């Protein structure tokens, strides 16, 4: 394997209508014939912002006016290694054109086919599809209360939900479980939200009978027990340590949550990571990471600046909504 690491600035250029601009690599280039996100190798002395603006001007003829970090990852091919620094571009001047003769097209996010992209771009596709806020369901008094809380959160724009059912609740409320799962499936489908299942292992079969949803979230205990990636569409995990992060990546997790970032009343004896350590721990993680623990919607920018995908929360999005 080559020891050279090529640092590339790339852009997910968004048009405001849920589409992203992709370009096709020349057949004679490395990974030729595949689609990619526009960008290129940084020149000596350039920072990411400078390189991104230069590349998009040279390749597409557009001037970037607003961008923010999306994902940074390192991918090792058999012949070279690439450090891909990807930003979303939400405002630009000019009309994109393939100035280097490259075909380009606007594509719906859900229509992006990972098989048509270099392997390094697959986590980028996931990051684009994932929102900045992630709801983890918390306590509720009844099935009706659960439904009200969930529907309120979805109405406030939540597009990613983890249905978290603890073993103690499941053993004592087995009769209500089916209703909770059905409500979650229907509500998330109506809102266009992704539903992740975090339920006791002995409830997996029941979930399969109730819903066709095949998105699994593993807590840190279950994560460490897995030997292979579960047969599911979206797979995520809860992480607290570097060991957890390594295991999640080795299993091919699509994204993870890392906690606790800040102090929480629910775990008063647990030392929080803090934002600096959070950033350090995910610096070489090649998949989207949500910050969890003592955070709410006001911390989204802080999480992004630290290299994260956004924030995950229970109370802030479930009990005490803060827009």
Image (cartoon, helix red, strand yellow):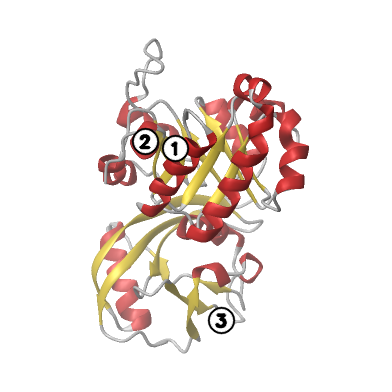
Q: Dot 1: few (<14), some (14–19), or many (≥20) neighbours within 10 Å?
A: many
Q: Position of residue 284 (x, y in %)?
A: 47, 40
Residue shown at 26% from the left, 75% from the top = 92
Question: Which image quarter: residue 243?
Answer: top right
Q: Secondary structure at mark 1?
A: helix
Q: Which residue is mark 1?
A: 282
Is the residue under label 1 in contact with that under label 2 (CB below 8 Å)?
A: yes
CA separation in Å, label 3 and label 1: 33 Å
User: Does the rendering let one see residue 282?
Assistant: yes
Residue 80: percent from left, percent from top: 58, 57
Taking 48 as reference, is 217 above or below it?
above
Q: Are marks 3 and 1 in contact (CB under 8 Å)?
A: no
Q: Secondary structure at mark 2?
A: helix
The residue at which mark 2 appears reads as: 279
The image's mark for residue 26 is 3
Q: Residues within 10 Å of mark 3 (few under 14, many from 20)?
A: some
Asked whether, in this view, residue 233 is left or right of residue 263, the answer is right
Q: Nearer the viewer, residue 79 or 9?
A: 9
Q: State which quadrant residue 68 falls in.
A: bottom left
Q: Position of residue 113 (x, y in %)?
A: 61, 69
Q: CA distance from mark 3 to mark 2?
A: 36 Å
Q: Which mark is residue 80?
A: none
Relative to 229, residue 277 above or below? above
Q: Earlier in the sequence, mark 3 or mark 2?
A: 3
Identify which residue is drawn at 34% across, 18% down: 265
For image coordinates 68% across by 28% down, the residue present is 174
Mark 3 vs mark 2: give the one in front: 2
Q: Measure how far apart labels 2 and 1 are at the Cα level.
A: 5 Å
Q: Could one spot residue 81 in this view of the protein?
A: no
Comes first in the chain, label 3 or label 1 = 3
């Amino acid at each position: 394997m080559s020891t050279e690491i090529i640092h590339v600035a790339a852009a997910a250029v968004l048009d405001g209508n849920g589409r992203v601009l992709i370009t096709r690599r020349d057949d004679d280039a490395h990974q030729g014939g595949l689609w990619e996100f526009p960008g290129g190798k940084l020149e000596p002395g350039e920072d990411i912002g400078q390189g991104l603006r230069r590349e998009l001007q040279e390749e597409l003829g557009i001037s970037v006016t607003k961008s923010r970090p999306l994902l940074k990852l390192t991918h090792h091919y058999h012949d070279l290694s690439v450090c891909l620094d990807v930003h979303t571009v939400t405002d630009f001047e000019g009309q994109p054109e393939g100035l280097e003769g490259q075909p380009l097209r606007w594509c719906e996010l859900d229509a992006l086919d990972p098989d048509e992209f270099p392997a390094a771009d697959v986590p980028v596709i996931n990051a684009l599809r994932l929102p900045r806020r992630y709801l983890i369901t918390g306590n509720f008094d009844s099935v009706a209360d659960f439904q009200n809380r969930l529907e309120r959160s979805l109405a406030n724009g939540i597009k990613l939900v983890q249905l978290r059912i603890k073993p103690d609740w499941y053993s004592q409320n087995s009769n209500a479980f089916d209703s909770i799962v059905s409500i979650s499936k229907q509500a998330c489908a109506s809102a266009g939200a992704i539903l992740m299942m975090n339920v006791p292992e002995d409830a997996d079969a029941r979930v399969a009978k109730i819903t066709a949803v095949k998105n699994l979230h593993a807590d840190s205990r279950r994560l460490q027990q897995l030997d292979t990636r579960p047969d599911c569409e979206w797979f995520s995990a809860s992480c607290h340590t570097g060991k957890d992060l390594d295991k999640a990546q080795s299993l091919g997790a699509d994204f993870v949550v890392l906690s606790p970032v800040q102090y929480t009343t629910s775990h008063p004896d647990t030392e929080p990571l803090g934002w600096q350590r959070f950033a350090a721990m995910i610096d070489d993680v090649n998949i989207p990471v949500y910050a969890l623990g003592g955070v709410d919607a006001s911390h989204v920018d802080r999480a992004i600046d630290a290299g994260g995908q956004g924030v995950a929360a229970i109370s802030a999005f479930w009990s005490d909504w803060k827009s």
